[in-house]
């Protein structure tokens, strides 16, 4: 496995890994620390038990100080009524401080005794015996007592096991599920709602910023969804506009055809008229289909090195034949070293449409000039005409389909599709096309990728 195969630093993999590893480490730490705490609570005497037993030792010490053996015997007799357990008061020699000697059972337990702070084994079959020194004078004696059953630790062992092994892990697992839900399911729900909106033809719907601003794979998917939604909305809007405009533009030549067919023209004139109108409709349909294809087709175009000067010579030859202009009116100041990288057919079509537009809007005897310069990895080309220019607020609108600012009749001055086709063709090759006014007319700028 190569380093390049590893997920990026913002990948969803690392978020999931951090979340799951953190959860596992948290559960291990909880199992160890909390389990140890609970275990200690079940092994050692409670504060209440230690306080009560220490109080008994203090009472035994006072009985010994006040009445010696008789006092100890009286206190033991009183304790037999208070506690149903065995207890005795002994000295340093492990002999009874009372007047009554130790019984055999008591003797067996005074040789090894536990303190108050010692752990109490939960596996012991009998109650433990504890030794509690006199609080004022520990050397004087100690109280030895069999731990009362009520003080035996571990009464809540089952309860704490349920809390430790069931409730707390369940709560942390629930928190993990909430984290996974917010991390994965919430953005997926947004994507599902986006898809449902598309299905309901609501193409203006966009994902929330919380989803698209993420740096992981789901954020990339969300941004791709939004881009696809914008692309789909633009494509549908363009197709709807083309259908509306195409139907509108076709009505005029069809109406003229109907009028011509109903008129009393001779056959030759009628055929010429029908031929002109058919040519107009054919050109309109071809341009419209070309624009729709450029907008919808996203397959990469084959690219090659193109010399702009040679391409211009080829285009101006055709333009001179169609327009009647002389070659001296179509000037090229671009250097012979101007080579760009692109698709020859689409770039030729774009430049041809731009040239035709410049000729159409320039006066008779005018000059159209192509010039350019190298700009880093790009060539910046511009085509100047000597027309009247365009209003500043219309500089972007001229690239919209079926836009004719001069109010020309459909077919006579074009259909307003040439610049739209040109911009789409240039953009498909990674370039730009925009317009600006100069002191002499309109300038159309092209930014194309340089070759080499």
Image (cartoon, rainbow, N blue to C red):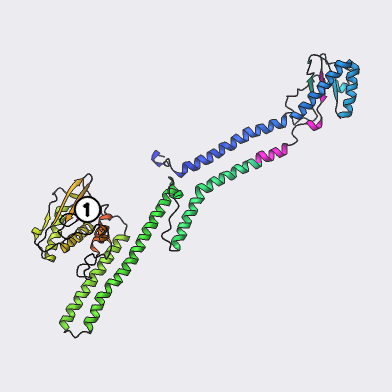
Question: Hey, which residue is sitting farthest bottom in the picture?
Answer: 264
Q: Is residue 400 left or right of residue 150?
A: left
Task: Give the residue at x 41% y 54%.
Answer: 225
Q: Is residue 395 left or right of residue 174?
A: left
Residue under label 1: 446
- Who is closer to the viewer here, 415 or 269? 415
From this viewpoint, is residue 450 visible? no
x and y, in percent, of residue 150 in the image: 80, 32
Q: Is residue 389 left or right of residue 216?
A: left
Q: Is residue 366 above or below residue 243?
A: above
Q: Is residue 269 above or below residue 384?
A: below
Q: Is residue 47 left or right of residue 300?
A: right
From this viewpoint, is residue 326 visible? yes
x and y, in percent, of residue 308 in the image: 17, 53
For label 1, the crowd category at 10 Å Cα-Cα, with few meaning under 14, some 14 to 19 and many 20 or more, is many
Task: Give the residue at x 62% y 43%.
Answer: 170
Which quadrant: the N terminus?
A: top left
- Examine the image and state in which quarter residue 419 appears: bottom left
x and y, in percent, of residue 325 in the image: 10, 63
Q: Is residue 254 above or below residue 2?
A: below
């Amino acid at each position: 496995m190569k380093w390049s195969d590893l997920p990026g630093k913002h990948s969803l993999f690392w978020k999931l890994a951090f979340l799951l590893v953190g959860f596992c480490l948290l559960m291990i730490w909880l199992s160890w620390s909390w389990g140890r705490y609970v275990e200690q609570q079940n092994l050692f005497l409670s504060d209440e038990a230690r306080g009560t037993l220490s109080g008994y030792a203090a009472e035994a010490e006072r009985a010994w100080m006040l009445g010696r053996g008789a006092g100890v015997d009286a206190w033991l007799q009183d304790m037999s009524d208070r506690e149903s357990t065995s207890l005795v008061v002994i000295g340093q020699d492990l002999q009874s401080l009372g007047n009554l000697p130790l019984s055999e059972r008591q003797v067996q337990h005074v040789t090894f005794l536990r303190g108050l702070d010692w752990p109490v084994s939960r596996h012991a079959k009998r109650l433990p015996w504890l030794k509690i020194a006199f609080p004022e004078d520990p050397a004087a004696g100690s109280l030895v007592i069999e731990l009362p059953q009520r003080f035996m630790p571990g009464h809540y062992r089952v309860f704490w096991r349920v809390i430790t092994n069931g409730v707390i892990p369940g709560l942390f697992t629930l928190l993990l599920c909430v984290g996974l839900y917010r991390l994965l399911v919430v953005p997926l729900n947004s994507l599902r709602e986006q898809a449902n909106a598309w299905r309901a033809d609501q193409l203006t719907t966009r994902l929330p910023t919380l989803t698209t601003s993420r740096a992981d794979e789901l954020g990339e998917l969300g941004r791709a969804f939004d881009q696809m939604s914008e692309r789909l909305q633009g494509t549908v809007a363009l197709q709807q506009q083309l259908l509306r405009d195409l139907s509108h533009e076709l009505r005029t030549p069809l109406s003229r055809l109907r009028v011509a067919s109903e008129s009393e023209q001779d056959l030759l004139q009628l055929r010429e008229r029908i031929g002109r109108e058919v040519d107009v409709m054919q050109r309109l349909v071809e341009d419209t289909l070309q624009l729709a294809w450029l907008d919808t087709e996203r397959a990469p175009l084959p690219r090659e090195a193109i010399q702009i000067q040679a391409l211009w010579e080829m285009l101006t030859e055709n333009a001179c034949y169609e327009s009647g202009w002389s070659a001296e009116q179509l000037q090229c100041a671009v250097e012979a070293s101007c080579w760009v990288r692109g698709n020859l057919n689409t770039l030729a079509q774009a430049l041809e449409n731009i040239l035709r537009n410049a000729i159409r809007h320039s006066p008779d005897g005018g000059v159209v000039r192509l010039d350019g310069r190298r700009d880093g990895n790009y060539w910046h080309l511009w085509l100047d005409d000597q027309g009247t220019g365009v209003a500043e607020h219309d500089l972007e609108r001229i690239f919209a389909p079926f836009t004719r600012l001069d109010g020309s009749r459909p077919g006579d001055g074009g259909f307003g599709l040439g610049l739209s086709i040109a911009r789409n063709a240039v953009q498909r090759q990674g370039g730009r096309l925009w317009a600006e006014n100069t002191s002499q007319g309109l300038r159309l700028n092209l930014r194309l990728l340089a070759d080499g």
